Amino acid sequence: MENEFRLADLAARVGARLEGEAGIVVSGVAPIEEAGPGQVTFLANPKYAVFARETKASAVIAKSRVEGSQAAFLLSDNPYFTFACTVELFHPPMRPPAGISPAAHVHPGARLGKDVTVSPFVAVAEGAVIGDQTVLYPGVVVGERTSVGEDCRLYPNVVLYHDVRLGARVILHAGCVIGSDGFGFAPSPKGYRKIPQVGTVEIEDDVEIGANTTVDRAALGVTRIRRGTKIDNLVQVGHNVVIGSDTVIAAQAGISGSCRIGNRVMIGGQAGLAGHLEVEDGIMLGAKSGVPDSLRASESRVWSGIPAMPHPTWLRLAMLLPKLPDLFRRVRRLEVGKIPKGEE
Amino acid sequence: MENEFRLADLAARVGARLEGEAGIVVSGVAPIEEAGPGQVTFLANPKYAVFARETKASAVIAKSRVEGSQAAFLLSDNPYFTFACTVELFHPPMRPPAGISPAAHVHPGARLGKDVTVSPFVAVAEGAVIGDQTVLYPGVVVGERTSVGEDCRLYPNVVLYHDVRLGARVILHAGCVIGSDGFGFAPSPKGYRKIPQVGTVEIEDDVEIGANTTVDRAALGVTRIRRGTKIDNLVQVGHNVVIGSDTVIAAQAGISGSCRIGNRVMIGGQAGLAGHLEVEDGIMLGAKSGVPDSLRASESRVWSGIPAMPHPTWLRLAMLLPKLPDLFRRVRRLEVGKIPKGEE
Amino acid sequence: MENEFRLADLAARVGARLEGEAGIVVSGVAPIEEAGPGQVTFLANPKYAVFARETKASAVIAKSRVEGSQAAFLLSDNPYFTFACTVELFHPPMRPPAGISPAAHVHPGARLGKDVTVSPFVAVAEGAVIGDQTVLYPGVVVGERTSVGEDCRLYPNVVLYHDVRLGARVILHAGCVIGSDGFGFAPSPKGYRKIPQVGTVEIEDDVEIGANTTVDRAALGVTRIRRGTKIDNLVQVGHNVVIGSDTVIAAQAGISGSCRIGNRVMIGGQAGLAGHLEVEDGIMLGAKSGVPDSLRASESRVWSGIPAMPHPTWLRLAMLLPKLPDLFRRVRRLEVGKIPKGEE
């Protein structure tokens, strides 16, 4: 499963500058505490430089050399990116063989591209289109007229409802659901009446979405996730939400209906956004934040807390909250000092 | 996929009063900013009246006429409800053809009603009962002795454990799990011992439950969701919970074991309720609230915050929290003003 | 489905001391408010002793006799544990018959143990190993080279990615996903680049994991859940997390990447932990807590709140928060009392 490279060749392939012996052979990657001879490791954070000094790894990917280390160095301005390329070299993506399992169920009115993998127990409905090289793992369900681009991976038991559109190189992890009905009901004296959710979902190229995440179809119109955005596990994306490009959303966050999330936004785990609000480009939102209103970059680039406030304010608040009981006591003392007895 | 109506006919069918030309023909619905000629749109909120003035839609569903608009008006006391009916007219629910796929697995000891749809890779176990007109999408699993009422829709990969009961017209979205074991373990010196969860789940008529939501079976007795209640995606309903009628629960909320939720309750997204508590009829609970104790309508109808408090209190608190660091400074100043130097 | 026992025999089997008539026959268990003649019930909490006095149950499992009750008593130092054993006696676990469904898809290069149940629409990939007596319910997917121990239960639509390892007697509830890619991306000027997640997941003996919970595989190395730990529904476990033995994690909690959770830890529902932190053995973390830093048992055994603080502090804080608007007013009053008019 692992390949071998001379350090000079590895450096050339991943675009790093080698400081060390060109001829050393490496055959794998490992965390810095565990790496041994023949392995490459990675110094993410200069504060862990001590590990680079002690490591038995043959080579360390880093921003700059660490004095006192016996290892060779693969230097890069973006070591995390270089690390990504290195891991990929040693572990080229596995791909199940192309072909349509006789245990799959593909409607004769569906269109499959070249070199598609359709695993057992996959159901592809009428009018669906599957792009070249795309892999559908077991139990994937593709609804009527849904189209999936080239070179996508839909892991086991992913469900795409009808009329959904996926771009190229989209990765959906197991159990992810795209296109379920948005949550819309009109109250009436006889109980709630369902608002039919007749819109759809469009997911652009190079999006990755985590396991058991749910993305609802629009009531009318389109729920949209733009190019290159990455969404973690168990996230909820409500109907008519638009999420920009290169945005990152951590696990268990929830985006209520009709939110507009910008480009290069970062949303922390378990954060929640109320409906119909806007988060401007480049904003960072802390884990577990609760956002009742739109977030403007002009006011703050980083927000946290419940309700969300500029991050420096939240940091001070978080330090002071445990001291609030004491503050109550202090105010009481001030009052008692001021208020003549009998007036209380 | 879309139908056509003269406005007079549409008004009659959805119970609205037409102000405008009876003979105008409309063939679809669209959001107010996007709607064009031949389309009907919807004015949800009088504060968006400006859109009604500028819209190119042929007709607007609203509570009252908006001066200056060129569109016809379909007036209704409950425009959201009228909108729901209108969307349904233009988009009558699609229904896969009835029939049992040869690629499904139905135990000979299961009983299927009339005009049932059993899709490929559906597994129906011994003793299960499926009501007339019910649709089981691909990958649905129905456990032993579980009964599903008439005209239900179970979207792909829904799982019903054994001995669960569903009423009529229940909609379960993809990946929803009903009847998994409640979370009950008895500590012992040798580790936790599982409390067998030998109760069940009953879901009454007209309930809708979102994608990847989980509803645990009771330890003993029944976890119950009453008629007409609507639950969003990724919600957790613990064992022995009882949820009343016409209650609405937004995405990622969590209801701990043995809670009793009343009728016409509204629970916001990511709200969490501790175990064994009661939420009285008609209560509204804000998004992200944390509820440690029972909520009484006599104390407040609307609750929010962590811990949950009457909503007006939470609104004031939410405004003041970012000012808490300043309050600490102000109290310090008061103390310094009072306390003679040297005493500190 | 239920069995019958004389009380004396029942007491002997579950290790309880009988106070009452040995010959009374019981045939089931029920909650204390509902139990009738012929049933056993359970007094969890001495404060519900009133129910034990009024119950019509034939016998009550409890720590000590309740005066005034007509029922027999089954006394135990650990009544909850004794209750677990009793329920199990009356409801011995059901087991689907062993055998491989012709509607399953088992790769010829997979290895199945003795008396394995492989249900319809189960996919077992090349190199997978399934231990003796293990049950795979419909729709389960087992990836390449993944091994599952003896006597496990994988409920419908569970997904195990490739190279995952499960111990013996592991229970995974429906829709649970093990081994999905961790959330790791390196930013670059051209957008995010995926860090290939080339580690794995190991789950030790006697672990139980709830419905639709997700456990990500390590980037490098292993995400590990140790013996006897119990995890509820919709929980997120990030890449490279290590969770100790006999730990309990309630629904919708989220554990970020590289956390180290100790043994016998208890984590409440919807709690969230930031990445790379440590929670020491035996710590209890309240529901909905937000944990930004490691938790040390020497500082407090019980933590709660956002941010997490020692539980007694949080309890005081939670009582005071609704009074904060009033505190602002009180401080204002103090200031006005101090500050001469005109200076404001």
Image (spheres, coloured by chain):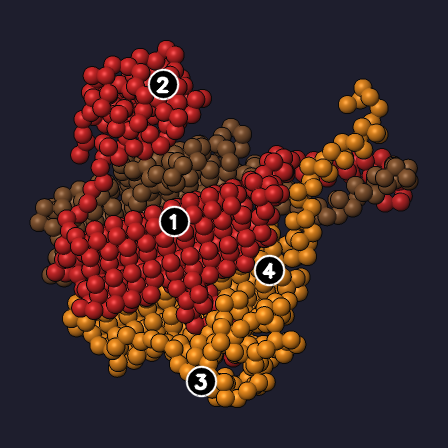
Chain colours: A orange, B brown, C red
Q: Distance between the residues labelled 1 and 2?
A: 36 Å
Amino acid at circle 1: Arg
| Depth order, front residue of C121/A11 | A11
Amino acid at circle 3: Phe
* Residue C36 picture quarter: top left
* Residue B227 picture quarter: top left
- Chain designation of label 1: C
Amino acid at circle 2: Ala
Return the residue at label 3: A5
- What residue is rendered at 22% in x and 77% in y? A99
On the image, the x and y values in percent for residue A315 come to 66, 53
Return the residue at label 1: C227
| Depth order, front residue of A222/A39 | A39
Return the residue at label 4: A295
Return the residue at label 2: C52
- Chain designation of label 4: A
Q: Are marks 1 and 3 in contact (CB under 8 Å)?
A: no
